[in-house]
Each structure stands twice: as C-alpha cells, then as structure tokens.
Amino acid sequence: MNLNTEHANGVAIVRVGEARLMYPLLSEFSNVVTELIASGEKKIIVDLSTVGYVDSATIGCLMDLYRQASAAGGGLKLAGVQKRVETMLTMTGAQNFIEVHPDEPSAVKSFGA
C-alpha cells in the first residue's frame, strides 16, 4: 500500500496514495494510524486527495480510528476528500463525526497549528 506519514506543526499527516481505499488495504492503513495514536499523537490528518473510491468497510474503519483518537484525547480529521468519497461519508452519516476539510493546510490550521 502506498502510504506516507509526515509531521507538520505538531500534526501527523497520513497521505494515502491509492486511487481506491478498500479491503484488503484497510489493514495496513488502520495499523499505521493505530500506531500513531498508540505512540501519543493527538492531532492526526488523513489526506485522501488521491482517493476516488471508498467502500463501506473503509467508512467503518475511519469511524473506528476516529473513536480511537478521541478516546486517547486526540482528534482525527480528513483532508482533500473527493466528491464521490464525500458522498459516501454523507450517506453513512460519518461526516457528522469526522471533520472534513477541503485541503491539508486548512485541516492543519483547524487544529490550531
């Protein structure tokens, strides 16, 4: 899986470099974010700007990671969400929980960084 993790202004940014984020790629993706949370990261952004398709398993995975981050006293936000992915988030109600930002800079700024 094509994943890249960087840190900017105290925010961990996980860039997903796949056109489709779905099972079976979710295991590796989930592990990377879970490890960030376990290591004490409180501000996590998942950059989905290259992702054009997600399935229901991906939405479930994002919700689980959001809950993990929140339970650890942190936050998880999405950046660069394409229209089709945004539709899935809206249809499932996930956007009521997970903040969605148009791009990475605005997501970083939303953390007060």
Image (cartoon, rainbow, N blue to C red):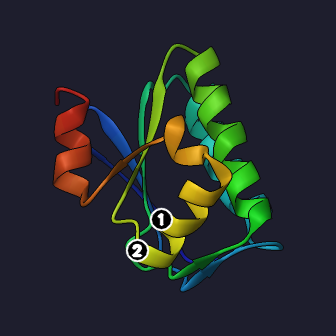
Residue at left offset 52%, top offset 22%:
40
Per the rendering, the mark at residue 57 is none
Disc 2 crowd rating (10 Å Cα; few below 14, some 14-19, many 20+) is some
Task: List the residue tagged with mark 1.
Answer: 86
Location of residue 109 in the rendering, given as x and y in whole percent from the top left corner: 16, 38
Q: Quadrant of the N terminus?
A: bottom right
Residue at left offset 61%, top offset 46%:
93
Residue at left offset 75%, top offset 50%:
60
Question: In this picture, is 98 found above or below 55?
Answer: above
Where is residue 26, by image quadrant?
A: bottom right
- Which amino acid does the dot numbered 2 rest on? Gln
- Which amino acid does the dot numbered 1 rest on? Glu
Location of residue 16 in the rendering, given as x and y in whole percent from the top left corner: 50, 69
Where is residue 81, by image quadrant?
A: bottom left
Residue 9 seen in the figure: no
Question: In this picture, is 111 found above or below 18?
Answer: above
Residue at left offset 66%, top offset 28%:
67
- As drawn, which residue projects farthest toward the front? 91
- Helix, strand or loop at label 2? It is loop
Task: List the residue tagged with mark 2.
Answer: 82
Relative to the observer, which residue lies in front, 19 or 94?
A: 94
Relative to the observer, which residue lies in front, 17 or 76?
A: 76
Asked whether the residues under the numbered discs 2 and 1 touch, taking CB atoms below 8 Å apart as contact, a structural biologist would say yes
| Left or right, 87 with reference to 80 | right
